[in-house]
Amino acid sequence: MKAAALKSGKFEIIETDKPLLIGKGAIVKIAGCGLCGSDIVKIKHNSVPDGTVLGHEIVGKIVEIDSESDFEVGDDIVMGHHVPCFDCTFCYGENYSMCRKFKRTNILPGGFAEYIFVSEDHLLNTVFRISSQITDEEISFTEPLACCIRCVKRTNVEYNSNVLIVGLGSIGILMGQAARELGYKAFGIDLIEERVNLSRLYGFEESFLLQNVEDTVKEMKLNVNPAGFDAVIMTSGADSAIDLAFKAVRDGGTINVFSSVKSDSSAYPNNEIYYRELTVTSSYSSSPVDLEEAFDYLQHHKVNTEGLTTIYSLQDINNAVSDTLSNKIMKAYIKI
Ligand SMILES: [Zn+2]
Ligand SMILES: [Zn+2]
C-alpha cells in the first residue's frame, strides 16, 4: 500500500506492507485524514524519526474486524488516536492527556496511508460510527473540535462570559463555536484581515483585526466591555499573543494557553498574574469524552466547518504542508 512517510522534514510517498489484523482490532481503509497543526509542528521541527507516517484526524471504512465492540465490516468511522487508562493519578484528575498510556497509544501507521490497524482499545474508546449526512472533511474535525471543547471547559468561566479567541485559523473558528455551544459569547482576533472577515460567518459576536496591540485592545474594550474580557483563549503562538492576552483580559479573568509560543517569548508576567488575580490555565489535546461530544456536535451540525478545508491528494501532501505554513489555506484534508 501507499503511505506518506517523513524524511528529513518532507513527506515521501512510499510503498509499504498493508497492516495485518493480528489479535483483536480492525483494519480501516482510509478515506482521508486532516493535517493537524501538531503535525505541522513535528514536520517544521523535524522532531519525529524518519519513516514516521503522521495523521490522526482519520475518516475511513472498516474492512476487517475481530472485536467485542459492535462495529462491523462496512462501517464508516471517524476516530481519535490516544486512549487514556482511566485508572491513574492523571486520569482521576481528568488530565487524560497527561496519562502515560494516553501518550503511548497510537495508530499504526498514521492516517496518511491507505490502511491502518486500529486496536481493540481504540475501537472501544475513540472510534465513532458515522450515521448522518455529513462529508468526510466535515466529520474529520472530530479530534480538533474535541480539543477545543476541552479547552473551553477548562477555561471554566461563568455562563454568558465574554471570551476572546486569539487566532482565527481553523482551530480558532472551531473554538469560537465550541465556546458559543457551551454558553459563552465568543469574540475573535487575528492579524489576517481575510480570517477576521471569514470568522464572522461562524457565529462570533464580533471579530477584530490586530494591528497595534494597545490600540486594538482599546477598541475591543470600547466595543465589548471597558473592564476587558472575562477570558482569553490563545490558539496562536504569535509573538504578540501573550502581550495581547494580558492586556485584553479583565482583572480577575482567565487566560487559557492552547498553543506553544517561540521559546524566547516565554517569560510570563508574574506580577500581572499576582496583582490582578488572574488565572492562567492550559489545555492539551482531548479525551474520549470530548471526542464523543465533538462527534455529536458535528453529526448534528451544531458546529459549522463548511468551507474551512482544502482537499489535497496523498501525492500532493507536501503542498498541503507549505500552503498551511504560508496561511494560504485554513485547513488541509488529505484524501487518500
Ligand atoms: Zn489533531
Ligand atoms: Zn491514566
Image (cartoon, rainbow, N blue to C red):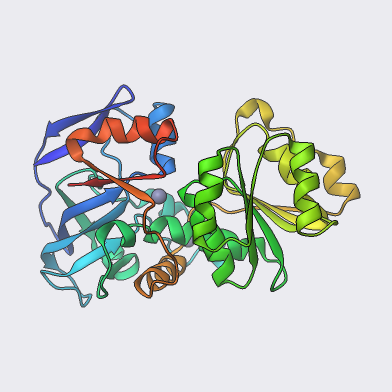
The residue most toward the top is 8
Residue in the image at 76% along x and 56% along y? 223
Question: x%, y% of residue 319?
Answer: 29, 31
Question: x%, y% of residue 232?
Answer: 69, 53
For residue 312, what is the image quadrant? top left
Asked if residue 209 is positioned above or below residue 20 in the image, the reply reads above
Residue 165 vs residue 58, the one in the foreground: 165
As drawn, is 78 to the left or to the right of 172? Answer: left
Total marks in image: 0
For residue 209, what is the image quadrant? top right
The residue most toward the bottom is 70
Residue in the image at 57% along x and 58% along y? 151
Q: Tell me if I can see residue 93 in this picture.
A: no
Residue in the image at 19% along x and 67% along y? 76
Question: x%, y% of residue 11?
Answer: 25, 29
Asked if residue 93 is positioned above or below residue 264 in the image, the reply reads below
For residue 263, what is the image quadrant? top right
Residue 307 vs residue 265, the one in the foreground: 307
Q: Tell me if I can see residue 328 in this picture.
A: yes
Residue in the image at 18% along x and 71% along y? 67
Question: x%, y% of residue 180?
Answer: 58, 68
Which quadrant of the figure contains the N terminus?
top left
Residue 168 vs residue 3, the one in the foreground: 168
